[in-house]
Image (cartoon, rainbow, N blue to C red):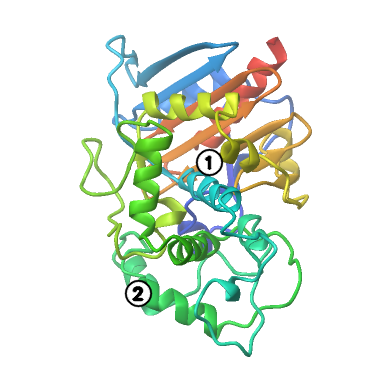
Amino acid sequence: MKLHRRFIKWGLATIVLLSEFITVPSISQDLPSFDSVFEEAINVSDDAIITIGYIEKGQTDFQVYTKEGVDESKPIHDYEVGSITKTFTGTLVSRAVEDGLLNIDESIGFYLNLPEDADYPTIRQLLTHTSGYPTFIENEVIIDNLTQGANPYQGVGREIMMNEIAENSHKEGKQPYQYSNFNAGVLGLVLESIYGESYAVLLENYIKEDLQLGTTHLFEEETPLGNNWLWSKETDAYVPAGALISNIEDMLSYLKLQLSEANTEIRTSHDVLSEVNATSSDNGELGIRIDAVAYQWMLNQKEDIIWHDGGTGGYTSYIGFNKAEEVGVVVLSNVAMDQGIPANLLGSLLLMEKLEKS
């Protein structure tokens, strides 16, 4: 089945998304199979390297695919995971709640040094994309990066973001769902404020010490697969939205932690924080549903799937799982959204097929 991709809202806002690709095949007949979609995905580029892993009833495995087929040597490639980073940010927020340092229904004005004569969203609204903030707030740095084909968010520092929070009016109360990288950046500022450490230090210590993920890290230098978005992990305010690099071994370990709800903050991070009903008809057909949002995790309540996807200028990614059936999938791809089939479509189709068999 040849897929005809329909790009919705294509333009500046979509180009700078780190996740939430509203990019799906136009479905006129039956739901496509994972195999048929994957065949097109892997053949889109001579340089395509797609790693697919899964956990099924305690069994873990992965395969690495190129245009030539399965790479039996199973090389471990580093990939940008884009907005899957947000699930780590959300878990850090969950930990702050468990530590008694944060109330998700408190205004961000309580934690950040902002003008007092204005309304600000709550932590819950930032976590669930109901703050009213857009994907990003346009500024000269972002526009300049876009004209150069660079990472749009590189160079947007804390001072710029704090000024943008102060200067942009906020409507009181829960707003309609609108996916926002800006939200994640603000959450990073809040975490820095309450812990007195940079987000980079907080996250990488948590990854190494608590999650025991040996190689997952914030961007520092070009990876072997190349085509990376450059970041300054210590100064860029959008880092909490999408600057992580990982590989299949670590992402499957991360998936295992989610399925087992290995600690309190991970278990809490799956809790429904807001019903949003943000599923388009095409995405819903493919299992890419957003019925509710947890601590940055997207919730498909119809199939009981918790998931998130990611994407940068050169990569797409997906992680999704069903705790009751003990099934989860990870897809890591060096094929960008505008080049071929994104990882969220591959991952969702594969996960739903596995759930049908379980």
- Horizontal side of 217 relative to 106 (left or right) equals left
Residue drawn where x is 37% and y is 19% of the image: 65
The front one of 110 and 80 is: 110
The answer to whether any part of residue 41 appears in the image is: no
Residue 219: x and y in percent read 29, 48
- SS of the residue at dot 2? helix
Ranked by sequence position, the earlier of labels 2 and 1 is 2
Q: In which quarter of the view is residue 301 placed?
A: top right
- SS of the residue at dot 1? strand
The answer to whether any part of residue 28 appears in the image is: yes
The front one of 232 and 123 is: 123
Which residue bears the numbered disc 2?
141
Residue drawn where x is 43% and y is 34% of the image: 211
Residue 259: x and y in percent read 59, 25
Q: Amino acid at mark 2?
A: Val
Q: Is residue 230 above or below residue 115?
A: above
Residue drawn where x is 49% and y is 50% of the image: 89
Q: Amino acid at mark 1?
A: Asp
The front one of 65 and 56 is: 56
- Determine whether label 2 and label 1 are within 8 Å by CB: no
Residue 276: x and y in percent read 76, 52
- Horizontal side of 305 relative to 189 (left or right) equals right
Residue 75: x and y in percent read 27, 19
Cα separation, mark 2 vs mark 1, equals 26 Å
